[in-house]
Image (tube, rainbow, N blue to C red):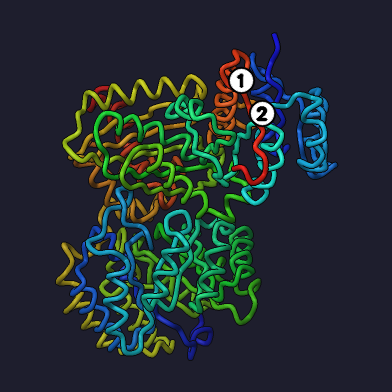
């Protein structure tokens, strides 16, 4: 069966883990891996796995997009170069899935708003942050039952699984996550915090979600909603688990989560990276199905027309 | 043994923590009037630096750490305007506080910032130390839970913070776990590695009763800034009681510029009456120091004991075994729930 062709930009940990997931897909076919360093291990690995590669950045990919039929690109580089990558590929009608914190396009957390986004026919979606992917489904699980005034999340990530970019710019991570808690978590106010733990052996990613409901929480309905949302996320992140809760204390609802990775390329403790690549792959698969059944037609976005 | 000649005549800046670390013991509910009362007393006693923030630093007011009675902006503004000599400082932990909150603190008149990270994660602080310097603040790199990494790596982390622009590097015994020899090792290794003009500080907790002894060891090894709290008000069994350190310093010939009697009076007349109970190494606080647990875990552990029937001491020992660090307060209730299920106290 024909599969929708994809390019991955950024052959680092995230890009490589994503590649392994796409290789298993029934509807996606990774054909290009794009890097900037000819000596990159990630490029060499992609080549061994049968992909075409370039170390010339997106400019090395652009001349081949039409001939090779690339329709979806994943950007796993950095917020600084994402805008340019996006412009060059959108012009050619390539749909962009953004794994950087650039957030040019609307936020996407598959279990929460993928269906709505696909109806809007956008050409760029942003995958928020790992903490956002892990916690926003729970925020939404509460806010779809009753109004939530305030949601707060704390993500604890193993030191070994957080890269230099995020370390250097932890505020960007915090800001993007708290924006998304409000915009797609559906609450009035959001706050995000993160802790990096260096324990050996590394700890599996942990996330805690606190919600303050406007009125007395409906315990049964919230508990049901949380369990159902957990199952939805497990559909693409099998290691997503409710460890404890929901716990009710006045209007405060607390949910304790653990996110174990699949261990495709990255170690299992790096659930934070796995949930990003799994969510991106899930998003692309849904779009690919629509491309394949003809309900989604990608249109080039020409400069100035955005 | 510390020879008198090592410390005779050494100049040390005292930094009071009771309006920041003490916020933990007060569950972040200190009033503006209490802050002003204590801070003006400390200022009159000649304490040169006074920290004023939520216990977990800028932006710490949250469900995770507890909400403070007033915002950081209100606390800092209220205290700054009343200071004659003392500089008001803030605690700032990247991941909890943001650059915008640090700008706010500087705008409100805070002149010094402790930019904190876990002792192995100094590279989280680059932007924040950079901003502190840019704002003209006395910018300190604050390496917390210092007992959790070997000396060589601890020094490497200090050097990173120095390279980002920190002009003082702290060895922070957040768990009150360290013994004087361990303080000596870390501080002297820092002293040998850092630029001679970079200052070194020590922040102790009194969970094993070593706050003063550890601070003296730090001074002997080259520290010139010592954190403590009037009446010891701070997380766990409290910080190094500052009036005790002042008295011992006087006896040993350390020059602090602080009036010891006036500082005793602040502790006795202004801080003590505010406390629900004086800090003491009860079995739970002692466990923090014994097992090496972040001192602020004490309060949520006691809450969990009341709520789920798991003894706080068992819980703290388990948190130490799981290598939980500062900021992971959510894991206290989570671990208590898991233990209560295992012990059949609540349904699984």
Which residue is rendered at x = 66% and y = 28% of the image? A72
State which quarter of the image contains the C terminus of chain B: top left
**Closest to the observer: B57 or B296?**
B57
User: Where does residue B309 sit, x and y in percent of width and height?
Assistant: 21, 36
- The residue singled out by tag 1 in the image is A288
First in sequence: mark 2 vs mark 1:
2
Secondary structure beneath dot 2 equals strand
User: Where does residue A248 sit, x and y in percent of width and height?
Assistant: 22, 35
Secondary structure beneath dot 1 equals helix
* Residue B318 relative to residue B146: left or right: left
Residue found at the far front of this picture: A305
Query: Does residue A26 appear anywhere in the picture?
Result: yes
Which residue is rendered at x = 38% and y = 37% of the image? A185
Which residue is rendered at x = 67% and y = 40% of the image? A302
- The residue singled out by tag 2 in the image is A72
Vertical placement of residue B215 versus A232, above or below: below
Q: Are marks 2 and 1 in contact (CB under 8 Å)?
A: yes
- How many residues crowd around disc 2 within 10 Å: few (fewer than 14), some, or many (20 or more)? many
């Amino acid at each position: 069966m024909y599969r929708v062709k994809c390019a991955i930009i950024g052959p680092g940990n995230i890009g490589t883990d994503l590649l392994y997931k796409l290789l298993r897909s029934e509807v996606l076919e990774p054909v290009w891996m794009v890097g900037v360093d000819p000596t990159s291990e990630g490029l060499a690995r992609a080549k061994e796995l049968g992909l075409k590669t370039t170390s010339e950045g997106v400019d090395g990919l652009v001349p081949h997009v039409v001939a090779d039929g690339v329709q979806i690109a994943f950007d796993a580089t950095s917020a600084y170069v994402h805008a340019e990558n996006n412009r060059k590929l959108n012009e050619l009608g390539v749909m962009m899935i953004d794994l950087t914190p650039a957030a040019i396009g609307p936020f996407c957390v598959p279990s929460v708003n993928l269906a709505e986004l696909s109806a809007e026919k956008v050409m760029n979606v942003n995958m928020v942050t790992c903490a956002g992917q892990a916690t926003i489904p729970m925020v939404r699980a509460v806010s779809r039952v009753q109004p939530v005034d305030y949601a707060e999340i704390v993500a604890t990530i193993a030191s070994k699984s957080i890269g230099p970019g995020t370390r250097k710019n932890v505020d960007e991570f915090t800001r993007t996550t708290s924006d998304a808690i409000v915009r797609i978590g559906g609450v009035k106010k959001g706050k995000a915090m993160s802790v990096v733990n260096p324990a050996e052996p590394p700890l599996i990613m942990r996330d805690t979600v606190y919600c303050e409901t406007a009125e007395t929480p409906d315990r049964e309905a919230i508990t049901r909603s949380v369990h159902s949302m957990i199952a939805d996320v497990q559909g693409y992140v099998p290691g997503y688990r409710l460890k404890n809760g929901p716990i009710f204390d006045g209007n405060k609802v607390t949910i304790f989560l653990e996110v174990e990775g699949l261990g495709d390329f990255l170690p299992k403790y790096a659930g934070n990276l796995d949930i990003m690549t799994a969510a991106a792959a899930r998003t692309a698969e849904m779009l690919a199905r629509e491309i394949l059944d003809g309900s989604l037609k990608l249109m080039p976005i020409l400069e100035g027309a955005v | 043994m510390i020879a008198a000649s090592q410390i005779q005549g050494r100049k040390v800046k005292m930094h009071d923590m009771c309006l920041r670390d003490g916020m933990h013991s007060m569950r972040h509910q200190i009033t503006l009037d209490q802050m002003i009362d204590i801070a003006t007393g400390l200022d009159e006693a000649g304490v040169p630096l006074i920290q004023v923030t939520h216990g977990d630093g800028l932006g710490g007011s949250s469900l995770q750490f507890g909400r403070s009675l007033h915002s950081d902006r209100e606390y800092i503004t209220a205290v700054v305007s009343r200071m004659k000599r003392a500089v008001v400082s803030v605690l700032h932990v990247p991941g909890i506080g943001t650059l915008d909150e640090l700008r706010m603190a500087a705008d409100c008149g805070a002149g010094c910032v402790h930019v904190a990270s876990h002792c192995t994660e100094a590279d989280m602080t680059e932007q924040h130390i950079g901003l502190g310097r840019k704002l003209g603040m006395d910018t300190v790199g604050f390496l917390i839970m210092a007992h959790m990494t070997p000396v060589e790596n601890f020094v490497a982390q200090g050097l990173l913070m120095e390279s980002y622009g920190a002009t003082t590097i702290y060895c922070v015994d957040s768990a009150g776990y360290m013994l004087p020899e361990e303080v000596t090792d870390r501080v002297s290794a820092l002293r040998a590695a850092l630029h001679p003009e970079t200052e070194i500080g020590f922040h102790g907790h009194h969970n094993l009763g070593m706050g003063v002894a550890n601070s003296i060891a730090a001074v002997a090894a080259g520290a010139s800034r010592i954190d403590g709290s009037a009446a010891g008000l701070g997380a766990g069994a409290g910080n190094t009681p500052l009036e005790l350190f002042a008295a011992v310093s006087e006896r040993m010939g350390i020059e602090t510029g602080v009036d010891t009697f006036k500082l005793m009076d602040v502790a006795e007349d202004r801080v003590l009456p505010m406390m629900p109970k004086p800090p003491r190494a009860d079995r739970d606080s002692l466990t923090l120091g014994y097992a090496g647990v972040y001192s602020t875990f004490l309060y949520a552990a006691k809450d969990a004991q009341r709520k789920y029937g798991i003894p706080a001491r068992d819980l703290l020992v388990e948190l130490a075994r799981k290598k939980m660090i500062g900021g992971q307060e959510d894991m206290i209730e989570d671990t208590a729930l898991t233990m209560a299920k295992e012990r059949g106290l609540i349904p699984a």
